[in-house]
Image (cartoon, grey):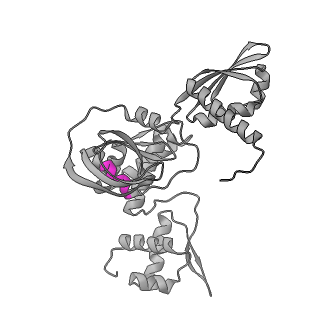
Amino acid sequence: MADLDPTARALQLLNLLQSRPVWTGPELADRLGVTTRSVRRDVDRLRALGYPVNAAQGSGGGYQLGAGRALPPLLLDDEEAVAVAVSLRLAAGGTVAGASDAALRALTKLDQVLPARLRSEITAILASTDMLAGRGAGAAEQIDGEALLQLAKCCRDRRRATFGYVAREGAATERRVEPVRLVATGRRWYLMAWDLDREDWRTFRLDRMDGVAGTTWQFPFREHPDPVTYVGESISSPHRHEAVIVVRAPLDALRERLGTREVTLTALDAGTTRLELVGDNLHWMAFHLSWLGFDLEVSEPAELVETLATLGSRMTRAAGAGTPYAG
């Protein structure tokens, strides 16, 4: 490395200092192919740029990169630069509370030094991504950065993609899709795409994908729903049953018993309350109503009346059984 110019050598020195806590002068000189005197000059050059390089004498001493009062420029590899730029641009768009202005300033500085090849990758991801607000709670799911980039490019270039996918129920499938848009929620990344085998629009979670590959097959533009709205509706709980029940109990008594948000209570008189309940499982709704401990009458739907009748008959038989089951 002796043929490196002083600036390039100083950057190489910085890389070495970032790779482990302490280096001795001779170790650095050997790695850089220079003398220890040149190492000292390069350390001074880094200090002049704002990097706090500490030096200690004696046994166990050496050079160490410390923490400074001002942040000097960082050295990032390609993958790190893409990740930082994408995160900053999403934060600058208001997806991280209080971070917009600072993210925009940092992004402006980073943008000035990004090579063209990385700008293209970053642009592909951001040009293919929308943000879905209000769904940032909970732990974030880890996704494959390369898969994200592949899908973003497919969205941008209108090229088909293939991947393995594990559905919500656990079934593993192979998918062939025409990607339209990526939607980030703060916790997860989703792909909205036309499923070629199912001939319908679908939402896919990126953390459930594997083997993502872009193809060379380009597809024509297809009219599609708004991606943010579509993904938002797709990932919401599918409430299939809306029930109306008249409960022989005062509203305050019911309010104390019910902790779920998916109910509406309306006082009909001092001792009777109208309960509107939403759910996606009739048996769970029937159990919930039986747990209330009040007399009630189901106005709708008829399927819930049937489920309650079946559950009541089963419980009556269980309570009246006096002999063990003989098989």
**In the foreground, 214 or 273:** 273
Residue at (42, 83) in percent of width and height: 31
Horizontal arrangement in the rendering, residue 14 relative to residue 256 (left or right): left
Horizontal arrangement in the rendering, residue 324 relative to residue 174 (left or right): right
Horizontal arrangement in the rendering, residue 192 relative to residue 142 (left or right): left
Image quarter in which the N terminus is found: bottom left
Picture layout, residue 132 above or below residue 61: above
Q: Which residues are the magenta region? A: 146-153
Residue at the limit of the structure toward the top, as seen here: 269
Residue 237: x, y in percent?
A: 53, 36
**In the foreground, 106 or 165:** 165
**In the foreground, 202 or 230:** 202
The prevailing secondary structure element of the residues shown in magenta is helix
Q: Quadrant of residue 69?
A: bottom right
Residue 246: x, y in percent?
A: 69, 19
Residue 233: x, y in percent?
A: 46, 33
Residue 17: x, y in percent?
A: 50, 73
Residue 308: in magenta span: no
Work out whether residue 113 can be spotted. no
Picture layout, residue 218 above or below residue 292: below
Residue at (73, 41) in percent of width and height: 318
Residue at (25, 48) in percent of width and height: 160
